[in-house]
Image (cartoon, coloured by chain):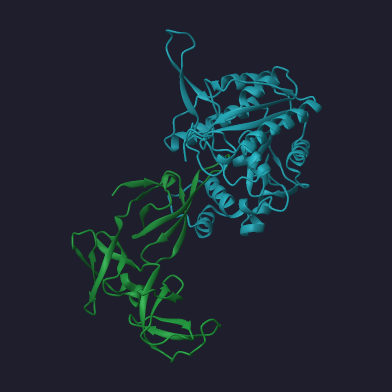
Chain colours: A green, B cyan
Amino acid sequence: MANYSTSDLRSGLKVMLDGDPCAVVANELVKPGKGQAFSRTKLRNLRSGRIWERTFKSNESLEGADVMEYDMEYLYTDGEFWHFMMTDGSFEQHAADENAVADCAKWLKEQESYVVTLFNGAPLIVTPPNFIELEVVETDPGLKGDTAQGGTKPATFSTGATVNVPLFVNIGEVLRIDTRTNEYVSRAKV
Amino acid sequence: MSAWRASCSQSNLKARAALYTQIRAFFVARDVLEVETPLLSVSTATDPQLESIQAQVKTHIGREEKPYYLQTSPEFPMKRLLASGSGAVYQICKTFRNGETGRKHNPEFTMLEWYRPGFSLEDLMLELELLTTEILGAAKAERLSYRDAFLRYVDIDPFKISDNKLALRAQELTEYYGPKMSRDDYLNLILSICIEPNLGVERPLFLYEYPPSQASLAQVSLSSQGDSVAQRFELYIQGIELANGYFELTDPDEQAKRFVQDNLERSQIDLPEIPPDEHLIAAMTHGLPACSGVAVGLDRMLMLKVGAESIDEVLSFPITRA
């Protein structure tokens, strides 16, 4: 991988830091009139998701990280790995471990498309689509007539996710969920 | 975005023109003479933290090319004017610093610099305060010594802390894990990242009494607390370093020593040596009147005036479009 000068880091660039791949979030030149130039850099550790703030001398260099994002379809899990397939027509398959799937496990539905981030060729992160349609498998019976008023109850979906939904929802209904906020959006259009 | 277009708005173009008019009126009223000095010179600042841009110049067609430097500030020729008997002078000019591009930096930028024979540093701070009040409507400035700023914001005594402790505290405070640096680099690092953003937020702030190692071209004297301090100030408004002023060094021998010291530091970090400005030394030997001088970043002043987030908003064409 190419090396990047710390003064040349732009948001979106992927670099290695302390052995972890990181995405540059922001980078600012800090240069007093009389004094050494520094780069004040915000990076997202792609492994942990955590934001790191670091300061570099402007001429330090960082190794680029071999990180690429691909659209992949979820196939199945064998209990240890979750298997995905490239949607570019290559049918290439990748096995993601528990760390990579992490919180996304509860949104995994067969034949749905996910963004899989590969680091050195292996899945590092699996990101669900922002919105996903899932079937309710468990919830209290729906309250008839209550279609507009507030009030929610928990519902469990086919994938295992639990989301608070309006009181009128029944088992077997397909709902549209925002995976970023874990919130009910609407009934799925059939 | 089409790169041929100006990056600043029409109203900011006008704000710049109005700013210059206001500044000129300010100095006309005070009988300070507007001057121009060369942007190209055979010498330049020796400060290891400044990189001058070099140009190859032929004084006549067919002559051999010689390296000249685009000036990082008009300080040396303006001091030569003072020694020539010019009296109080000011200049608005372009200055150049290689490699400096960012939210508050452009490699080519505009500086207002003026010198006041007979002024103490405090006299000059008051005059600068009048100018900022007039232009920015800023409130009365606060004064904070370099030591008190460090004590207040990071609980470090910059004059007393050991080198090792300073390096450790800097690492903790700024997440800097790079190569070991000089004491002044660590102080600058902490100042830039942990202190500056707090300076001049409510009202403008003068930071003064710098460590003598950061005197640059200022005189060194004893503070009220008995420390050796540089007679230097910086003005901060809303966390932005806006101006740098000195009670100017007038001793040619001390000046020559600082040139040598700078070049020594340059050689230690593999930077090319800068030929010391012999004209400046000669002018100081002839006699530079006791004076104070200050440089103000006009692009930054304009940013503050119009509320710009980035210097590009006040430049017609920043370096990426130049």
Q: Does A49 appear above or below A56? A: below
Horizontal relation, residue B100 to residue B308: left or right: left
Q: Position of residue B271 (x, y in %)?
A: 44, 33
Q: In this view of the protein, which residue sits in the foreground, A64 or A116?
A: A116
Horizontal relation, residue A91 to residue A188: left or right: left
Q: Position of residue B98 (x, y in %)?
A: 49, 33
Query: Which residue appears farthest toward the right when viewing the image?
Result: B29
- The residue under the point 73% across, 42% down is B136
Query: Which residue appears farthest toward the left when viewing the image?
Result: A91
Horizontal relation, residue B35 to residue B56: left or right: right
Kindly tell me whether residue B287 is visible in this rendering: no
Q: In this view of the protein, which residue sits in the foreground, A174 or A35?
A: A174
Kindly tell me whether residue B13 is visible in this rendering: yes
Q: Does A153 appear above or below B87? A: below
Query: Toward which corner of the image does residue B23 lie, by quadrant?
Result: top right
- The residue under the point 24% across, 80% down is A79
Q: In this view of the protein, which residue sits in the foreground, A136 or A90?
A: A136
Q: Position of residue B257 (x, y in %)?
A: 57, 30
Query: Toward which corner of the image does residue A83 lie, by quadrant?
Result: bottom left
Q: Does A188 appear above or below B280? A: below
Query: Toward which corner of the image does residue B206 lie, by quadrant?
Result: top right
Q: Position of residue A143 (x, y in %)?
A: 48, 90
> Could you tell me how many numbered marks the image carries?
0
